[in-house]
């Protein structure tokens, strides 16, 4: 009768040892995890490449007015074939030539083109910084989720230890004839259920931790222990003040404003290309033997041309530089302004919703903490009643399960509160650690 319970106790102790924190394990803090996530993100590295490319263009605006330069060379040989004196090989009949040309094109939309390049770099920079912020938030969420799983293992361990102690007491009482075999078997089953729950939670935690370590560029099988706790502090924020202070700084709002500016520049560029004259200056030097074999001659030519578009001034004309392209560009600006209003409305609603949910969720944490205290007291009283013979073993197991459930519920609401803080920080584009100080 005693072999199965004792075997269960041995397996339970082995599980506790396997999932317990190890003294020689390397610690991994939240800050270090976020740092590694930023370093290892391939998507962020690609955005950084795009940012550098846009930075080169923005730093070399002079390239927009850099002239078109061409150079060439030619070698020729001319001799009669059917007329006198017929085909002959004569070095004097060999001719050569070299040329160099430079063309300046001054378009009226040149200023808009330069501003578009600078704006493209600002847009890339905004996207890169926003991606970094979002990656930090996601890494922090994953880290806290693993901390919650780790704490849940501790809760399951405590629950199992209580069941184990109770089983040992019941085993002694059963051997002395003080409790029935049913009570003894029920306490044995409780230990086995606790062992199974700990085993499942431990396996899931190990899998999630391994995936997270691989994401950070670490060895998934390394002996690493997460350092940190979920200890949320109450955050009270006025959504009206937050909207007024941070709405204009949100990356999506800033990005939409940049889009309006880009479209305005593009519309101006389209109007100038369709209606304003452009100036081209071409110079060309040519040298060679030419018509005088064996004698070098050269020439320098220059030309100035003005292109005056006509189609853009005629209503209804199509094509790239027609009047319809100008109207289409202006329509794009108007639609972008409407998109900005829509983006701002969504941002206001998001900030208000997160702020109110954050404020209301603190009451859930207080209730959950109170439930843990009540469950602990109820378990103590039930355990005392069982020792005095006035409470059944099933009631004791229910009290123990209720305590475990209350602890798990507290853990869940605390994790949800931390996630809401991170989400609100992301919505405001601020550091989540500083959110409670605002």
Image: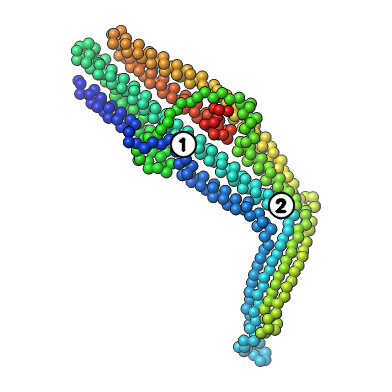
Q: Residues within 10 Å of mark 1 (few under 14, many from 20)?
A: few
Image quarter hosting the N terminus: top left
Q: Nearer the viewer, residue 273 or 136?
A: 136
Image quarter hosting the C terminus: top right
Q: Quadrant of residue 376?
A: top left
Residue of label 1: 31
Q: Quadrant of residue 372?
A: top left
- Cβ atoms under marks 1 and 2 closer than 8 Å: no
Give percent across and percent down for residue 287: 68, 76
- SS at circle 2: helix
- Report the mark closest to the observer, 1 or 2: 1
Decide: is 189 above or below 430: above
Relative to residue 326, is residue 435 drawn left or right? Answer: left
Give percent across and percent down for residue 375: 40, 16
Give the numbered dot on residue 378. none
Decide: is 414 above or below 265: above
Relative to residue 166, is residue 337 drawn left or right? Answer: right
Q: Judge whether residue 353 can be spotted in this image.
A: no
Decide: is 427 above or below 117: above
Residue beneath the point at 36% across and 37% down: 26
Residue beneath the point at 61% across and 29% down: 242
Q: Residues within 10 Å of mark 2 (few under 14, many from 20)?
A: some
Residue of label 2: 111
């Amino acid at each position: 009768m005693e072999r199965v319970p004792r075997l269960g106790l041995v397996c339970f102790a082995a599980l506790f040892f396997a999932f317990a924190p190890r003294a020689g394990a390397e610690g991994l803090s939240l800050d270090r995890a976020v740092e590694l996530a930023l370093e290892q993100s391939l998507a962020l590295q690609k955005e950084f490449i795009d940012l550098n490319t846009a930075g080169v263009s923005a730093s070399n605006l002079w390239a927009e007015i850099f002239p078109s330069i061409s150079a060439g060379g030619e070698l020729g040989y001319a001799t009669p074939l059917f007329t006198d004196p017929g085909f002959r090989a004569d070095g004097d009949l060999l001719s050569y030539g070299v040329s160099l040309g430079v063309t300046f094109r001054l378009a009226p939309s040149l200023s808009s083109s330069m501003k578009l390049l600078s704006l493209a770099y600002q847009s890339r920079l905004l996207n890169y910084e926003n991606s970094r912020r979002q990656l930090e938030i996601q890494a922090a969420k994953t880290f806290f989720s693993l901390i919650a799983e780790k704490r849940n293992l501790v809760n399951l361990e405590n629950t199992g230890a209580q069941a184990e102690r109770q089983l040992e007491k019941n085993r002694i009482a059963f051997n002395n004839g003080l409790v029935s075999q049913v009570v003894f078997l029920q306490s044995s089953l409780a230990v086995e259920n606790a062992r199974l729950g700990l085993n499942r939670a431990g396996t899931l935690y190990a899998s999630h931790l391994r995936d997270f370590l691989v994401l950070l560029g670490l060895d998934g099988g390394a002996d690493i222990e997460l350092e940190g706790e979920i200890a949320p502090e109450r955050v009270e924020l006025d959504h009206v003040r937050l909207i007024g202070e941070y709405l204009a700084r949100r990356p999506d709002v800033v990005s939409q404003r940049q889009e309006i500016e880009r479209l305005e520049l593009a519309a101006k560029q389209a109007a100038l290309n369709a209606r304003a004259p452009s100036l081209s200056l071409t110079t060309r030097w040519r040298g060679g033997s030419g018509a005088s074999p064996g004698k070098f001659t050269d020439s320098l030519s220059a030309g100035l041309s003005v292109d005056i578009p006509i189609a853009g001034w005629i209503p209804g004309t199509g094509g790239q530089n027609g009047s319809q392209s100008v109207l289409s560009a202006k329509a794009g600006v108007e639609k972008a302004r409407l998109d900005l209003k829509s983006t701002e409305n969504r941002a206001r609603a998001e900030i208000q919703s997160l702020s109110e949910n954050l404020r209301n969720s603190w009451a859930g944490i207080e209730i959950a903490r109170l439930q843990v205290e009540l469950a602990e007291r109820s378990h103590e009283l039930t355990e005392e009643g069982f020792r005095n013979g006035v409470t059944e073993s099933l009631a004791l197991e229910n009290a123990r399960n209720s305590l475990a459930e209350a602890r798990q519920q507290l853990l869940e609401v605390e994790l949800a509160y931390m996630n809401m803080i991170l989400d609100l920080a992301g919505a405001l584009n601020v550091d989540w650690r500083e959110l409670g100080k605002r």
